[in-house]
Image (cartoon, grey):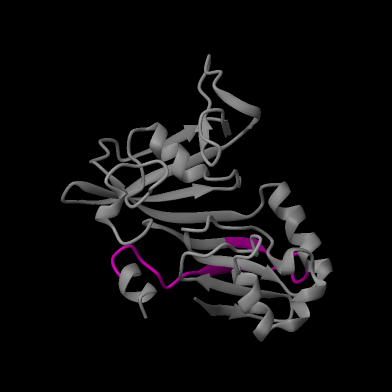
Amino acid sequence: MYRIVFEDEFIIGVDKTVTIPCLRQGESAGLSDELLLEFPQLVSVPDFGFTHRLDNETVGVMLVARTKDYYDAMRGLFSMKLVNKTYHARVTGHVEDKKGVIDLPIAHSKKTEKKMVAVREGYRIFRGNPRPARTEWTVLKKSGINTDLELKTSSGVRHQIRVHLHSMGHPVCGDHLYGKHASDYPSLMLISRTIAFKCPVRNSEIVLTSPLTLDNMFTEISM
């Protein structure tokens, strides 16, 4: 379900390896329930220390704070966009350009409750206020009918990468919500690969890395 990739007195680098919500959703257990068994002190930290979240289906590295003070400090870094996150995704089709940027705000879909939408100029079929979102992408390799991408973002809008890739016509492989033929893949092929930031206490650079890759993720997840 998870493994620890980094640990000190302030944070825990958690590698999420299964489809599960980060926090409990009603009667459905979350990753937080499992972490509390190993780190019971997280009960006194807001959101059980989760300074950010991944979609239920997304796997990879996450940052959990061990104290309220560090949680607050990290939330401040996230709000100032001083935390750099890198993802790897396998998408459908061949992406022609070598790199690019998707700079489209994201809002809740007016048609489907669980979906988000990229809001282009003149688009009006959404609920609430669109949130700014920017995703940079670079092609890693092409194989068969798919393309592997590295994606970078400092924002954290719900379903951001999945929605942005869908908007460019290359949804993530295995995405039942935004893609087609998702059942051809065991799960969503999206990995939170690295999180990089400057420690607000020590003022040193920290980089957390997931051991998961697009080529080994299904083997690792099934272990």
In this view, the residue farthest toward the front is 27
Give the residues in magenta.
Answer: 196-216
Q: How many marks?
A: 0
Quarter residue 41 falls in: bottom right
Nearest the eye: 12 or 50:
50
Name the residue located 40 percent from the left edge and 41 percent from the top edge: 178
Residue 203 visible, this orientation: no
- State the residue lying farthest toward the bottom: 38
Q: Nearer the viewer, residue 27 or 189?
A: 27
Q: Is residue 214 left or right of residue 42?
A: left
Q: Is residue 211 left or right of residue 11?
A: left
Residue 31 is at least partly visible in this image = yes
Quadrant the C terminus occupies: bottom left
Q: Left or right of 76: which side holds 92? A: left
| Residue 104 spot, x, y in % from top left | 52, 30
Q: Main secondary structure of the magenta part?
A: loop
Give how far across and how far down residue 113 sits, in percent. Answer: 56, 37
Q: Residue furthest left?
A: 144
Measured from the top left, where is residue 139 in percent x and y?
32, 47
On whether residue 204 falls in the magenta region, the answer is yes
Residue at 82 percent across and 73 percent down: it is: 44
Residue occupying the point 57% across, 37% down = 133
Residue nearest the viewer, comparing 20 with 202: 20
Residue 5 to residue 73: above or below: below
